[in-house]
Amino acid sequence: MFSLITRRCKAPGVAGLVLFSCMALPVFAQNNPSDTLRMRLPDMEKRFLDSNLLLLAAHYNVDAQKALIEQARKWDNPTLNTDQVVAANGRFLPYGKNPDGSFSGQYYIQLQQLIRTAGKRGKLIDMAGTNARMGELQLQDLLRNLRYQLRSDFYTLQQQVANRNTYLLQMQQLKVLMDGMQTQLAAGNIAQKDYLRIQSLSVSLGQDIAELDRSIAENQAEMRTLLQVKSNVYLIPDETAPQPSAMPPASVPELLETAKQNNPSYLLQQAMGLYQQQNLSYQKALRVPDIMLGPNFDRNSNTMPNYFGLGISIPIPVFNRNQGNIRSAQYSVKQQETLVSHAETELRNQLFESYNKWLLALQQDNTTNKTFYEKYRSMYANVVDSYRRRQIGLLEFLDFFNEYTASQQRLLRQRLNEQLAKEAINYYAGTDIIK
């Protein structure tokens, strides 16, 4: 389910958190809060499946390819040939009876049916079926790519929003600090250079927020296109920070076998190999000439008044036995076999790389002290208060402030790397192995 963020935000009573919850959204989202959409990842994926226009177009392509299977099953239409006399012996359409009772005028009628030999019709049906299967795999591959893009954007936006919230809290704490320093500056208790250093830190932090807002805007635009939502809608990931994933009960060789059965890009290469094999079989069948067979009737021909015959037409494969097309199809088969081998090697390496990245991310998360960042956040508030009370110096405060900012960014980046590595494994495996 998704919900709309309400317009009103109540400010907490603690000075360090004044208006923080209202500041958690960028300015352009605050200006039109009724168009701010908070969604969970499953809801985004459902909307994406229901409304993405690229997927809809790919569905139409699959339907079009399936219609060609039905067309390939159709028999060739018969051909009607006729030759009618229009004028003869000064008469127009000289049809009727002669004085002796015989028919006058001459006409010829022939009905022909093409009979395909060597199983050509069945081979065309097989090729149309494989082509439709390739269309389905292309749809699955498009879905896989767009879903991976949506998930990557979702987790990236989640990290960006969390990073922005950290900046905003720091900005609010600096504002409270600067308000107090202004009073001290007016009383002559602190040097102006100290106030300017803190003010410079606040300006730099504001620039970082503006730069982050630009990145968020780009991410938002991409997600709006994927979800087919209006350009004035601001999307918010409605989930807490992702938790570390569990280890999958599989090794890289097992993941590779899973990928061979589910990865649509690899399966598409295999389907193209099958299509080339079927095309080679069809090209070889074309060496066998087709037969044109049909009855014919000729009235008042040269030999007899009413002639019934059976016509058979068959080309003699003397000069052209489709040698060039067969040779081309053979090379296409070898080419596709090489591409399938390359696709398997590439898939193995991609899985191995993404799996190792994911293991490294898990290892880094497991070795990180879980309580470290909580203590660090608590200490940060104390350090700001200590500097305000002039219990620590400016340089010590600036060092701690910058290091705290960097540590929070590293933590968020670490969590994002883990999520992206997990999604990369699922992407190459072609199925959600890791939840």
Image (tube, rainbow, N blue to C red):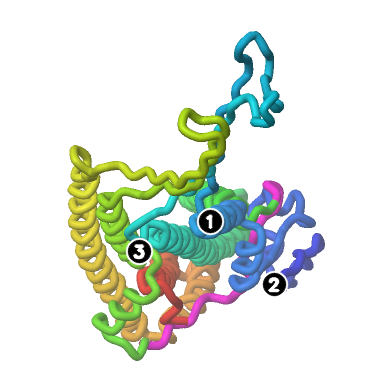
Residue 184 seen anywhere in this rendered image of the structure: no
- Residue under the image location 19 percent in, 41 percent down: 318
Upstream in the sequence, badge 1 or badge 2? Answer: 2
What x and y, as percent, mark residue 41?
59, 71
What x and y, as percent, mark residue 329?
24, 51
Residue 74 bears which disc, if any?
Answer: 1
Q: Would you place residue 429 above or below residue 335 in this image? A: below
User: Between tags 1 and 3, which lies in front?
Assistant: 1
Upstream in the sequence, badge 1 or badge 3? Answer: 1
Q: Quadrant of residue 424?
A: bottom left
Q: Main secondary structure of the magenta part?
A: loop
What x and y, as percent, mark residue 92?
68, 15
Which residue in the protein does label 3 denote?
Answer: 271
| Residue 232 highlighted magenta (yes or no) | yes
User: Between tags 2 and 3, which lies in front?
Assistant: 3
Q: Which residue is at the far bottom?
A: 249
Q: Is residue 117 left or right of residue 136?
A: left
User: Between tags 1 and 2, which lies in front?
Assistant: 1
Q: Amino acid at mark 1?
A: Lys
Q: Would you place residue 97 above or below residue 418 in this image? A: above
Residue 14 bears which disc, if any?
Answer: 2
| Residue 244 highlighted magenta (yes or no) | yes
Magenta stretch: give its range: 230-247
